[in-house]
Image (tube, rainbow, N blue to C red):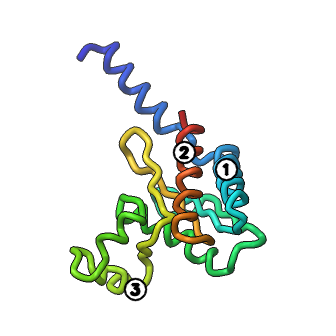
Amino acid sequence: MNEDQLSSVIKQVIAQQQVDYFSLTKMEKVIAAAVQRADEFKIGVTIAIMRSDQVVQMSYHMPNANLVSSTLAPKKAWSALAMKQPTIQISEQVQPGAELYQIETMMGGQLTSFGGGIPLEINGKIIGAIGVSGGAVKQDQAICEVAVETFKKESD
């Protein structure tokens, strides 16, 4: 590798590290998209956007959402981040007889295994997760998918 090639690689790495994936503007767009989808379902939800360091970067609790949603949304984001997969997939793995049966108990209730949590992946690296809670599992999952799609679109 010559000096020009090395310099180019270094510049790319530095540029990637300086990208603000969790800017206020982007997160507001993500939450607005999720709220719009929740409104289509006529339900209230809580949306939590979590970075890979487990910090909730932004959370929004719709006025018509149940109180329990404010606890479950960040748990779903954390679970997707910790397991590196959508929480809807975890559900299959924790059923009686499955490989991860009783992991939720072993985790002291921190892990949740129903839909509505999806990791945020950019260039093959998980940088965070989104959790949505407040509707039926299918509704939470659909709202979360819209939020993740919006996040990815805004990251391009």
**Helix, strand or loop under label 2:** helix
Which dot marks residue 108?
3
For residue 21, what is the image quadrant? Answer: top right
Circles 2 and 1, Cβ within 8 Å, touching? The answer is yes
Q: Nearer the viewer, residue 7 or 128?
A: 128
Which dot marks residue 149?
2
Please determine whether, in this image, residue 6 is positioned above or below residue 143: above
Q: Quadrant of the N terminus?
A: top left
The kind of residue on which mark 1 rests is: Ala
- In whole angstroms, how far apart are the C-alphas of marks 1 and 3? 32 Å
Task: Return the x and y of residue 154 as percentages of the image width and height.
Answer: 59, 38
Q: Is residue 151 left or right of residue 112?
A: right
The kind of residue on which mark 2 rests is: Glu
The kind of residue on which mark 3 rests is: Gly
Which dot marks residue 55?
none
Q: Is residue 130 left or right of residue 90?
A: right
Q: Nearer the viewer, residue 52 or 67?
A: 67
- In whole angstroms, how far apart are the C-alphas of marks 2 and 3? 31 Å
**Helix, strand or loop under label 3:** loop
